[in-house]
């Protein structure tokens, strides 16, 4: 047997742990796993030595914004940034594109915008907003991976929030995964114009997350539906989630790199590049979030890549109340998480579980997110001991605004393969993914 590609690494991260291995690829799929030194006949035989080999990451929380807000970000720039960061599959959020993905026509408009422009594989979430319950079944049949809903103002007028009653009706309308932005508008206070980060955090307290998660849990329980809590920041919501999970309610939860790597204490006055919703909280909360990740109470880590025009970050005034909330980090997620994970004693296998297999399982992509025979040969050469300084000029996002500017991070992505071919940033080879219709 001759293979198209063999990649060898002394640190291959396989589903059963990290060990020296050779990964053989044929026709875009992983065809065999063998010992590091195994004689294998291949067109290309690449030996990474001590550079780690990871499964391509799956990032199920990315706002691409095209069409409609392509000046914020687009499929070409977002997917190039993704590939540079070791992400080989992303699932695009139904906002902040215009139109938002709340009808089949809008989904087709998005696919038309994405077609031929993607450097990694891309799937799509649909959205639930007041008035589109009648569109959900058709959207699901058209291949969305599930539906996003907001319980609080989304930040854009064309994607209004739902209340508990409408969420529950949506859960009963279609058998699909629902992903929820869980902050309770009743506990979110208007924040006065202020360059002080503490004023912003006070406007979105842990209670807002805790009570929204209680709403989500109650709805999931009554509808016997599958619900996923997006971007958990506060550990205040964890007890509620754990109790419901123990009861058999089908709940999962994600957190994001910025909650794991940045703290409220370090945000300088006026540094609105740190603004996101829910907010980055204090160091004690962060330690407890890591503990939850370590013990499996949090299922996965995804970027919530949420870019905007630089002027919307209001660096001119440093006003946290007026600035857009969102951190664009799809390219930096892996080194950001790895830097902190390593410091806390976690291994690459943990990171692969949180950032590749976990999100792949969330959206039902068994051929993604793990180095296993039969799966897509989406691979990352990750130099886990090398360091680099974050220079905004290294970023392929449309706008290089980042709270990580100037930070030293550990872990450099040396190469990314999509279905067995290196992603070079030239010809886009990403596919548009469809969830299997029920
Ligand atoms: Zn988001």
Image (cartoon, rainbow, N blue to C red):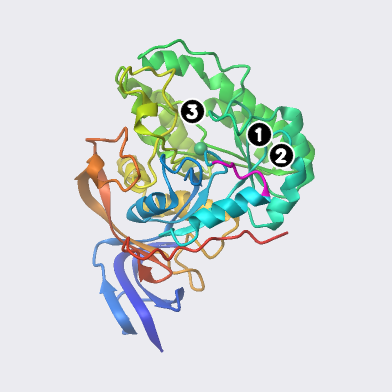
Which residue was labeled with disc 1?
Answer: 243
Instruction: Examine the rendering and report whether any part of residue 432 can be seen.
Output: yes
Give the extent of the magenta segment: 98-103
Mark 1 or mark 3: whose residue is earlier in sequence: 1
Which residue was labeled with disc 3?
Answer: 277
Callouts 2 and 1 close, C-beta under 8 Å: yes
For label 3, count other residues whose C-alpha is less than 10 Å away and answer few (under 14), some (14-19) or many (20+).
many
Q: Return the residue found at the far top.
A: 192
Q: Secondary structure at mark 1?
A: helix
Say whether residue 28 is magenta.
Answer: no
Q: CA distance from mark 2 to mark 3?
A: 29 Å
Left or right of 141, for residue 290: left
Task: Kindly indicate the quadrant of the structure image that contains residue 108.
Answer: bottom right
Residue at x 37%, y 22% (from the top left corner)? 264
User: Of residues 138 and 38, which is closer to you in this image?
Assistant: 138
Q: Secondary structure at mark 2?
A: loop
Name the image quarter holding the C terminus: bottom right
Which residue was labeled with disc 2?
Answer: 247
Q: Secondary structure at mark 3?
A: loop
């Amino acid at each position: 047997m001759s293979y198209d590609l063999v990649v060898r690494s002394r640190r291959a991260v396989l589903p059963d742990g990290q060990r020296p291995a050779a990964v053989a690829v044929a026709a875009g799929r992983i065809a065999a796993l063998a010992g590091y030194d195994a004689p294998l006949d291949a067109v290309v035989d690449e030996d990474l030595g001590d550079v780690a080999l990871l499964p391509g990451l799956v990032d199920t929380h990315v706002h691409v914004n095209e069409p409609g807000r392509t000046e914020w970000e687009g499929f070409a720039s977002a997917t190039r940034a993704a590939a540079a960061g070791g992400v080989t599959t992303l699932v695009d959020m139904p906002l902040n594109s215009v139109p938002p993905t709340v009808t089949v026509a809008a989904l087709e408009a998005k696919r038309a915008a994405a077609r031929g422009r993607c450097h990694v594989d891309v799937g799509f979430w649909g959205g639930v907003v007041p008035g589109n319950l009648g569109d959900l079944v058709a959207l699901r049949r058209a291949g969305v991976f599930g539906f996003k809903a907001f319980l609080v103002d989304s930040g854009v007028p064309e994607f209004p929030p739902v209340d508990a009653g409408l969420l529950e009706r949506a859960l009963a309308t279609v058998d699909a995964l629902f992903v929820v932005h869980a902050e309770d508008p009743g506990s979110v206070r208007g924040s006065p114009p202020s360059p002080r980060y503490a004023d912003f955090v006070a406007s979105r307290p842990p209670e807002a997350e805790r009570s929204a998660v209680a709403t989500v849990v109650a709805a999931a329980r009554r509808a016997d539906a599958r619900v996923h809590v997006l971007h958990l920041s506060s550990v205040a919501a964890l007890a509620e989630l754990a109790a419901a999970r123990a009861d058999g309610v089908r709940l999962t939860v994600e957190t994001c790199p910025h909650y794991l790597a940045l703290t409220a204490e370090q945000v300088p006055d006026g540094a609105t590049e740190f603004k996101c919703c829910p907010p980055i909280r204090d160091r004690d909360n962060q330690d407890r979030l890591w503990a939850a990740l370590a013990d499996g109470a949090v299922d996965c880590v995804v970027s919530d890549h949420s870019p905007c025009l630089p002027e919307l970050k209001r660096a001119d005034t440093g006003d946290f109340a007026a600035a857009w909330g969102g951190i664009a980090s799809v390219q930096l997620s892996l080194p950001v998480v790895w830097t902190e994970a390593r410091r806390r004693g976690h291994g690459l296998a943990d990171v692969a579980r949180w950032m590749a297999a976990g999100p792949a399982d969330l959206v039902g992509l068994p051929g993604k997110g793990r180095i296993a025979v039969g799966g897509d040969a989406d691979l990352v050469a990750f130099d886990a001991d090398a360091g680099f300084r974050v220079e905004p000029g290294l970023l392929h996002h449309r706008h290089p605004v980042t709270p990580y500017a100037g930070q030293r991070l550990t872990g450099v992505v040396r190469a990314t393969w999509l279905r067995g071919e290196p992603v070079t940033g030239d010809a886009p080879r990403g596919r548009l993914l469809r969830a299997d219709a029920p």
